[in-house]
Structures are given as structure tokens and as C-alpha cells.
Image: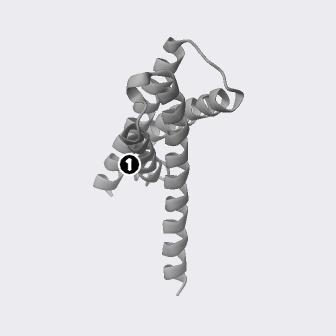
């Protein structure tokens, strides 16, 4: 019974992370879409939300690499998945935070800032997806 509850809690947590990623993607999409006319579509918003959901689902709760404390070479290795996950999560969340600020405060930043937010979102989410894929293929 305890295993079922733990699995249910884990799935529930992951779904919550996916929803947070989708919401973040929605805010980035609304900000970018309101500044760049070519990206004002429901399809763009859907792509942003789905990419955020996948990135946050896969890239935040990455299984750690197994290190052997007696092996000196193993102790010096960098866990690429963990590092990519951390950087990707930080970057995606940071630009989502800025997007929320712009949308709520009705700001009109320079187009270069909007492009930087879009690029930051793409890199952050891609890092999360790659990190989650690496971690799950080695587990």
C-alpha cells in the first residue's frame, strides 16, 4: 500500500510541475506574442505551453547519477543531467518571471528584450528536456 501512495504522490507532483511549466510557457507566449505580430496565434501559445509542460515534467526531479565514493574518478565527474536541469530550470523560470512582470505591469520593453526572453525560454526548456532524457536513459 505504501508503494502505491508514494507512486501516486510522485505522479501528482510531476503533474503539478508540468502545469507550472505550462503556465510559465503561457506567460512567455502571451508576452512574446503581444510584441511580435507573427507569433500572435493560438498555435504558438499551445506550443509554448506544451514545451513548458514537457520541460518541467522531465527536467525538474532528475534522478541523480550514482557515484561510487571509493572511486576517485567517479567523485570528480560532473553530473551533466543535474547541471543542465538546474541551469534550464533557472533560465526558464527567470524569463517566465520577467514575462509575468511585463504582462501584469503592461510594460512595453524593447524588442531585443522580448527576443532575449524568447531565446532564454527556448534554451531553458531544451536544457530541461535534454537533462530529463539523459537521466532517464541511464537509470
Quadrant of the drawing holding the C terminus? bottom left
Place residue 77 in its image quadrant: top left
Left or right of residue 27: residue 107: right
What residue is pinned by disc 1?
132
Outermost residue on the right side: it is 105
The total number of labels drawn is 1
Mark 1 nearby-residue class (10 Å; few <14, some 14–19, many ≥20): many
Q: Which residue is at 45% across, 53% downward? A: 57
Outermost residue on the bottom side: it is 1
Q: Which residue is at 30% across, 53% downward? A: 138
| Element carrying mark 1 | helix
In the depicted structure, whether residue 37 falls above or below residue 67: above
Q: Judge whether residue 138 can be spotted in this image.
A: yes
Q: Which residue is at 49% across, 81% downward? A: 4
Residue 37: image location, x then y, percent: 43, 23
Of 65 and 84, which appears nearest the observer?
84
Q: Which residue is at 46% across, 19% downward? A: 115
Outermost residue on the left side: it is 137
Residue 1: image location, x then y, percent: 52, 87
Left or right of residue 72: residue 22: right
Of 77 and 70, which appears nearest the observer?
77
Q: Judge whether residue 77 can be spotted in this image.
A: no
Left or right of residue 55: residue 16: right
Residue 67: image location, x then y, percent: 41, 50
In the depicted structure, whether residue 111 falls above or below residue 124: above
Left or right of residue 128: residue 104: right
Amino acid at each position: 500500500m505504501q508503494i502505491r501512495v508514494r507512486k501516486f504522490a510522485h505522479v501528482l507532483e510531476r503533474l503539478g510541475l508540468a502545469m507550472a511549466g505550462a503556465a510559465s510557457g503561457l506567460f512567455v507566449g502571451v508576452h512574446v506574442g503581444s510584441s511580435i505580430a507573427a507569433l500572435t496565434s493560438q498555435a504558438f501559445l499551445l506550443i509554448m505551453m506544451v514545451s513548458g509542460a514537457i520541460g518541467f515534467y522531465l527536467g525538474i526531479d532528475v534522478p541523480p547519477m550514482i557515484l561510487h565514493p571509493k572511486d576517485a574518478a567517479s567523485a570528480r565527474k560532473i553530473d551533466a543531467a543535474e547541471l543542465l536541469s538546474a541551469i534550464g530550470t533557472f533560465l526558464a523560470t527567470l524569463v517566465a518571471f520577467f514575462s509575468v512582470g511585463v504582462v501584469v505591469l503592461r510594460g512595453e520593453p524593447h524588442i531585443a528584450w522580448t527576443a532575449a526572453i524568447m531565446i532564454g525560454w527556448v534554451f531553458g526548456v531544451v536544457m530541461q528536456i535534454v537533462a530529463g532524457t539523459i537521466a532517464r536513459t541511464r537509470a
